[in-house]
Image (tube, helix red, strand yellow):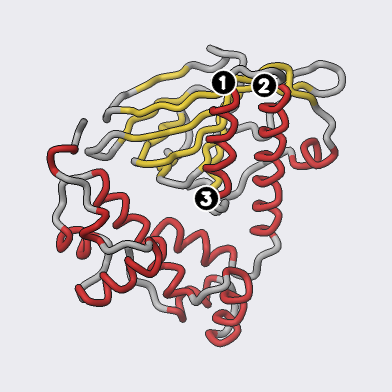
Amino acid sequence: MNNKHNVNYMTIKKGEFYIESLSSAHRYIDPPNVYIRYANEHRHDRLVCIISGKCKFDIFNDKPIIAKKGDIIYIPYNIAYRTEWETESRGEVYSINYVMNDRDSHQITICPEICSFSNCDSFLTEGIFKECCYTFEKEETGFLLKCKYILMKLLYTIVLNEEQKSNSKIGKALDYININYLDDISISELASMCNLGECMFRRCFKAETGISPIKYRNKLRIEKAYELLTNESHSISDVMEMTGFYDASYFNKTFKHYIGKSPSECRRPKHLLNV
């Protein structure tokens, strides 16, 4: 996943732009739902928030990007790409399409390539996307003005998150865990990625995230377990093993700590699957 973007943050931070047009949508997608978009096919840029499922973005002449729940994908209007959903259950996305111009009315993009922003606060960003879509669909007085304000708030959130990552002492470890959270990796290996000793790494990690590296990884695993239980027909024991837990008691306790319900309470009834 591309974690280093040539993002035009100065344009955003200085506010040297205006939103010419904007639309927003909410979609459920039945996999694989292969889609191809050609460069300059549409004039708008697009921000996509993955609510559930996993989507592969094949970018011509570049490495593919795998987008999962909680990720935000930025797609400039002048990039060609192909998407394919890789999960058995249907995906869910919110999107914001917009045209952004500079003060001389020339269209600008915030990044020259497709970007995946994977470390944003998923609850915050999902809420922003949902608010924009709801406002756009209601079409009440001043709805476009409010949608533009919401988009500004989203761009600010992305910029703030990316700046925090660039200043982070544990950024490389966070990026690694966010992508490989189902794999087992030692604290010493994570610390080595950041050129820190183990004790210093643990202190820095907790200072930046509020929790230990193991709890952070387990939180991601539980979020994946919740997604599997609510969208697919796997048994609880299968989901437990698929997400790296091998003790049922520990899995149930950890799941309830983060989700607020037990795995059995969250499991989707079979008669509701693939509806």
Against 130, residue 117 (above or below) is below
Mark 2 lies on residue: 143
* Amino acid at circle 1: Lys
The structure residue drawn at horizontal position 56% and vertical position 53%, both measured from the top left corner, is: 121
Measure the alpha-carbon separation of dots 2 and 1. 8 Å
**C-beta proximity under 8 Å, tags 2 and 3:** no
Can the viewer see residue 181 in this picture?
Answer: no
N-terminal label among 2 and 3: 3
Q: Are marks 2 and 1 in contact (CB under 8 Å)?
A: yes
Q: Residues within 10 Å of mark 1 (few under 14, many from 20)?
A: few
- The residue sitting at 48% across, 35% down in the picture is 62
Q: Between marks 2 and 3, how big is the CA–CA gap? A: 23 Å
Name the disc covering residue 43, or none: none
- Disc marking residue 138: 1
Residue neighbourhood size for the residue with mark 2, other residues' Cα within 10 Å, grouped as few (<14), some (14–19), many (≥20): some
- Above/below status of 44 relative to 16: above
- State the image coordinates of residue 167 (x, y, percent, origin top left): 70, 63
Q: Is residue 220 left or right of residue 109?
A: left
